[in-house]
Amino acid sequence: MYEVEEDTTATTTTETTTKTASKDGGSKQQQQEKKPSEFMRVQRLFRQQTKNARGKVLPKDKRPPVDYSIVLDFSNLDKNTEENKALVIDYTDLVDKSDAGASEYYAHPSTWRVYGIKDYPGFYFIPSPFTSSQQKKWVKDSLEQYANVPNNTNINLFYGPVKDLWQHGQQEMITEHQQLSNQLLSDDDDNQETSTTSRPLDKDGKELPPYRELLDKLAWATLGYQFQWTPRIYSRDFYETFPDDLQDLVQKIAMATKYDPYIAEAGTVNFYSEDSVMGGHLDDAEEEMEKPIISLSFGASAVFLLGAETRDIAPIPLFIRSGDIVIMGGRSRYCYHGVAKIVENSFNVDLVDEADETFKYHIQWLREKNRRINVNTRQVFKKKEENNNSTCTTTSSTQ
């Protein structure tokens, strides 16, 4: 199941109404709230209060802080609770890095730290093996290539294929800045230029909204086998070329964690803003479930929930920071998981360099709403077959 950027928490707790006869022959309604699952209970711990007792919206700087003390942090092992320290397993000296080659896109695997979690064999966590410039390369690719046609995105579903969404959106950002600068220099509101150029049309023949607006709506893109959302299947009829350098990276990760051979055949790129969450769900649409989901994250930090085979078992919350890698294999491949929170004010400031014209606007767009990009890959089929139109399906509707 793909990670879709949406808040599913509002629909997981329902109210049931029962009518019981009263002594005088009348009836009354009793509202009984269904007890939330343990997964939901933990997820709610990271909800930030946004309104006061009178229902008035609280400014961000007036909201009570979220308590992150129970979150497992692989980047600061000594600062964890004793309970969390007992969960951490150091696999650094046990993983296979003998045949891993060098790359300009990530640090050599011989330098990686690799951790696991007690009772989750096959789950691995690699704190960022990327320099800041390497992280920016993956951010740039996510926006310019992965979220571009012919790959499918949530934007395409509503408007039809939008080619070069990032490039057009970036140009609008540059134009906005130029107009603002000109206005400040001239002190003349009437001196602003307005564009009279007609906009491209969407699939319904209506003018597209500004690309900048579409960028802010960008939630996901698919790679390789394009997941068919309504029937929940992968089909060999819908395949786009998988990026070679991303394939190389995830294969190195699989080799280091003893999941070799691993072929990334499909992937999802999720674009989170600070108010995004992800309800507990399973990734179970793949035929090949013995190979892991390999996940890369860039930008803001998230509180990730690693649950169990049922929502009735409390998940373990852990921080995923910019550049971190998560390998969900073994038991964790069959467990509920989700994103409880994008941590406020957590954007990786090491990515910010105003003098770097190549990545300036990519990072600006991420930082303005404390955004996070997550790229997760998976092997879909148990073996590769040529000229076969078979599909891989699942009967689960969990999201």
Image (tube, rainbow, N blue to C red):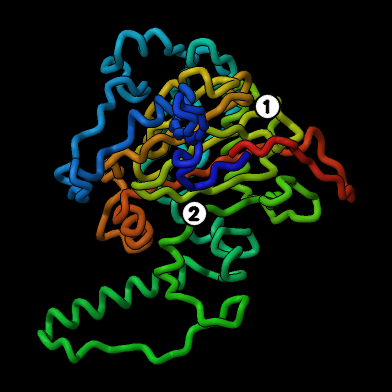
Going 37% across and 37% down the picture, which residue do you hit?
Answer: 341
Residue 26: in sight, yes or no?
yes
Residue drawn 36% across the image and 21% down it? 72
Q: Nearer the viewer, residue 283 or 368?
A: 283
Task: Determine whether the residue tagged by mark 2 lies in a helix, strand or loop.
Answer: loop
Q: Quadrant of the C terminus?
A: top right
Farthest residue, direction front: 24
Q: Position of residue 124 (x, y in %)?
A: 52, 22
**Left or right of 105 in this view: 247:** right
Question: What is the spatial separation of the Cα atoms under label 1 and label 2, in whole angstroms?
Answer: 31 Å
Q: Residues within 10 Å of mark 2 (few under 14, many from 20)?
A: many
Q: Position of residue 95 (x, y in %)?
A: 56, 17
Say which mark, if any, is on residue 260.
Answer: 1
Could you say whether the residue bearing mark 1 is in a helix, strand or loop? loop
Residue 228: mark in rendering: none
Number of callouts: 2
User: Mark 2 highlights which residue?
Assistant: 219
Amino acid type at mark 2: Ala
Q: Is residue 231 above or below residue 213?
A: above
Specify the quadrant that holds the N terminus: top right
Along the horizontal axis of the image, is 293 left or right of 210? right
Q: Nearer the viewer, residue 60 or 237?
A: 60
Question: Do we see residue 296 in this rendering?
Answer: no
Q: Position of residue 306 (x, y in %)?
A: 49, 25
